[in-house]
Image: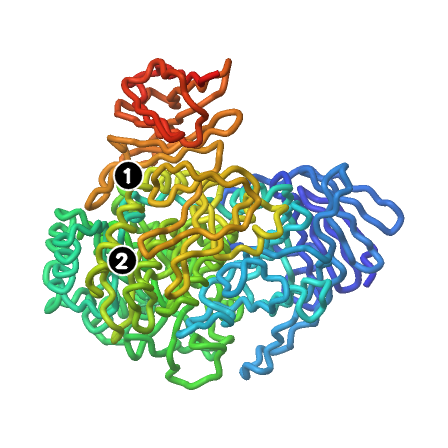
Amino acid sequence: MRLAQWAQEDAAVRVWGETDALEVSVPLPGILRVRVAPEARAGTLSFPRLAAKRSFAVRPGLPSGQTLDVQEEGETLRVTGGGLSLHLDRRTGAWRVTGDGTETELARVLGWQGEAPTARPALDAERFNLRRSRLSLSAPDGAAYLGFGERVGPLDKRGMQLTFWNTDCFPHHTETDPLYVSVPFTTVLRDGQAHGVFVDETWRMTADVARSHPHELRFASAGPELDVYVLAGPHPADVLRRYADLTGYAPMPPLWALGAAQSRWGYRTADDLRAVIAGYRERDLPLDSVYVDIDYMDAYKVWTVSGAGFGDLKAFVQEAAAQGVQLVPIIDPGVKVEAGYDVYEEAVAGDHLVRTVRGDILVGEVWPDPAVFPDFTRPEVVAWWAGRHKMFTDAGIRGQWNDMNEPACFSLAQPRETEGKTLPYDARHGQRSHLEMHNVYANPMSEASRAGYARFAPEIRPWILSRSGYAGLQRHATVWTGDNTATWSHLALSLPMIGGLGLSGLPFAAADVGGFGGDTTGELLVRWYQAALGYAFVRNHSALGTADQEPWRFGEPFTGLIRAALEERYRLLPHLYTLAHTATHTALPVLRPLALHHPADEDALREDGEYLLGEGLLVAPVMAAGHRKRRVYLPAGRWAAVSHLSASTTVHDGPVHLVADAPLDTLPLYLKAGHALPLTDPTPHTGEAHWPRLTWLAHPDETGFVGQVYGDAGDGPVTGQLTRVVGEWRDGALHLRREADGPLPDRTEELQLIGLPPVREVQGAADFTHGDGLLRLTLPGGAGEVRVVLKD
Ligand code: GLC
C-alpha cells in the first residue's frame, strides 16, 4: 500500500492511497486516535474523507480535538499533538505512537489490511466476512494485557483468543469466551509502564492476544474500519483516567445499593419477598435491597405486574421501604407479542422494533414467547422506552436490573443460524445490521433507564444494573458477571473477572454471591460473603430450582459467620462509599487488582486471588474448601494484619509471601503503612452517609498517614464533602488533625494507631488508652491538634 497523499483539515490529518484511508486526530491530551480504513474506496465510508461516525462509547460533548503539527520526514509522516506523536511509514502503512519529545514508544502497528465488502448482503451467516478489517500491533516480550471487558481466566490476557460478541452463556466455565460484555480496551503493562489501546468498534470483532503469533496483538473486525485510540500512561491509573475522559465516568451509586442484597429466581409473590425480608430482620442480618426476578410480571410481559402475586406494587414498595429495603425489579428487552398489550402495540405502531433482513418484524422467543425486540440503537426508541419507567418511579422504585440484553433469544420464528442464542447477523436496526449493533444493544437500553429516572424522579440517584454492554456502558449502568455457578472455581474466578471489568472502565461490577447455578454449601456461602467484602455490591442470587441460599439456610455456625461477614462490610461502608465516590472522578474501580498500584511487580500481576480496596487495604479471601490457612502475597510496603478490621501488632515487610491463618470466621486483611481506614458501626440497613460515628484504623509510616472519607445524604445529588484525618511526624511527635473541604462534621471520631513505638505522652486528645503497640484516642471535635510524643 502506498499512502501518497495527505491533507490537514480541522483537527484531523487525512492520509490516503489508492484504496486505503487513514485519519489521525488527538481528541484529548494524551489520547491519539487513528481511524484505519482499508478498502475505504470500495466501502461506505466515503473517500478519502471518512464520514463522521456515531460512537456509543465516546461520551457526548467531547471538545473539538487538539491542534496538530505535521512534519514530512522522507516517507515518514509525523503528526504531533496533545503530548503524543504518530509516525506513519507511508510505504507500508505501519505506524507507531510515541510520547511527545521523549521518543518512548507506546504502541506500534505492524500493518493492517482489509477486504472489500461483499456486493450484496449475504443471507447465509457463513458467508459473512467476519474479518473484513485487520490490524496487527506489536506485542513485545513481557508486555501484559489487562482488561478487554468481561473475560474468564487470569487478569493478564496474553495468550488468549478473545471474541467480542455479547453472549448469554449458561453455564459458563473457566474457559468460556465470549461472555456478556464487550469492551475492546486494554491496558498494556510493560516494565512497570502502562499505555492503553481502545478499538472503538461495535462490529463483531476478535483479538488474538499474542496467541497464534507470539509477538502480535491482532484485531479483526467485520466492519469497514478499525477505530483505534492509543492512550498514554505512564501509570495504569493514568490510562484508566484517560479512558474515562474519553468514554465517561460512572455516576455515583446510592449508598443503599452497596448494602446487602437478596435475590432469587423463584420468589413468586409479594408474600415470598415479605418472608425474605422478615428472615433477615428476625436474624439480625443486615439487608438493604431485594431484587425481584421475572415472576413479578404478568406472563413475562415487561412493564406489567402480576395482579395475583403482587397486587399493589406501590404499597408493597412502601412496605419494604419502611423496613429499610429497596426493591430492584428486573426488566428484559423482549416484548411479548400479544394483541392489546400496550407495550407491544406501541412498539409496532411506532416502528420501534428490530426487523429481519427482509423487512418483517423479527420474532423470537425469550421468557415471553413469541417476543419482539425494541431497537434501542435508535434515539426515538430510547425516548419511548425511557417513558415506560414512569410505572416504576410512580411506585417509588429507585433501582432496576436490565437483563437478557445481549439480546438473548432462545429461538427464532423463522429459524436462522445465529452465533449464540441471539438474533441473526443480518437482522436490521434501521439501516444497520445486527452484526454491527449486537454488541452495543444493551448500552442505549440502560441509557433509556437512566433517562427515565432523570425525567420522572430527578431527586434520586438511580441504581441500574445491566447484564450486557459495550464500552461506555459505565455512564448508564454497572454489570454483574451473569450466570455463574455455586462452585469454588467460580468464586475464585470472580476476582480477576471483576478486576478486569474495573480495568475496562466499569468500576462497580460484582458477581452473584453464592453462585447462580447449582447448589451452594454453607462453607462456600460463608467464604463467598467474605470474599465479597470489596465487591461494589453484594447480591446473593440463585437460579430457579437450585437449593435455597439465603444466609440462614445452612444453620449455625454458617448463619452467624455470614452475619459477621456482612457486619464487616457494613463497618467498612464509609471506606467503600469513599472508593465509589473516587471512582466517579478517577475511574479507579472499587475492587482493584494489585497490578493497578504495583505495576512493576510481576508477582502482584499474577496474584489473581487477592485485591486492593484503595491503595491501602489488601484483601486475601480463602477460596478453597476446607482450607483454614492461605498463602498471601504482600507487595512492597509495610502491612499490618487487620483481619476483622481490628488493629493488631503483627506487621509484615513486603514484598513477601507468607501463610496466613484463616479459620472459617476470618478473612485475611492487611493495612499498608501510610494509610487510615474509616469505619463505622454496623446497622440493620444503611441510612444517610453522614456517618454519625467514625473509627479510623491508622497505620503510620515514616512520614505519617492520611485517611479520607466522603459523606453525603446517601442518595440524591452528589453534594457531599471529603473529610480527612492526617498524621504527620514532626519533632519526634506524631501530629494528628482532621481536615475537611468545608466545615468539619460534628461527630465523634476515634483513632486507633497501629505499629507505634513506645509513647511517652498524648496531648490534646479527649481520652486515650495505650498498650501493646496500639494507641486508641478520641479526636477533638473541632480543628484542634493531637500530639503523640514518643519515648526517647
Ligand atoms: C437470566 C439472568 C438471571 C435471572 C434469570 C431469570 O439467566 O442472568 O440472573 O435470574 O435470567 O430472569
In the image, residue 95 sits, relative to residue 268, either above or below, namely above
Given residues 187 and 475, the one toward you in this image is 187
The amino acid marked with disc number 2 is Arg
The location of residue 324, given as percent across then percent down, is 17, 47
Gap in Å between the C-alphas at discs 2 and 1? Answer: 26 Å
Residue corresponding to mark 1: 714
Given residues 213 and 596, the one toward you in this image is 596
The location of residue 284, given as percent across then percent down, is 16, 50
How many other residues sit within 10 Å of disc 1, few (<14), some (14-19) or many (≥20)?
Answer: many
Residue corresponding to mark 2: 388
Residue drawn where x is 43% and y is 67% of the image = 489
Residue drawn where x is 27% and y is 58% of the image = 388
The amino acid marked with disc number 1 is Gly
Which residue is at the far right? 74
Residue drawn where x is 37% and y is 42% of the image = 576
In the image, residue 403 sits, relative to residue 518, either above or below, namely above
Q: Is residue 179 visible?
A: yes
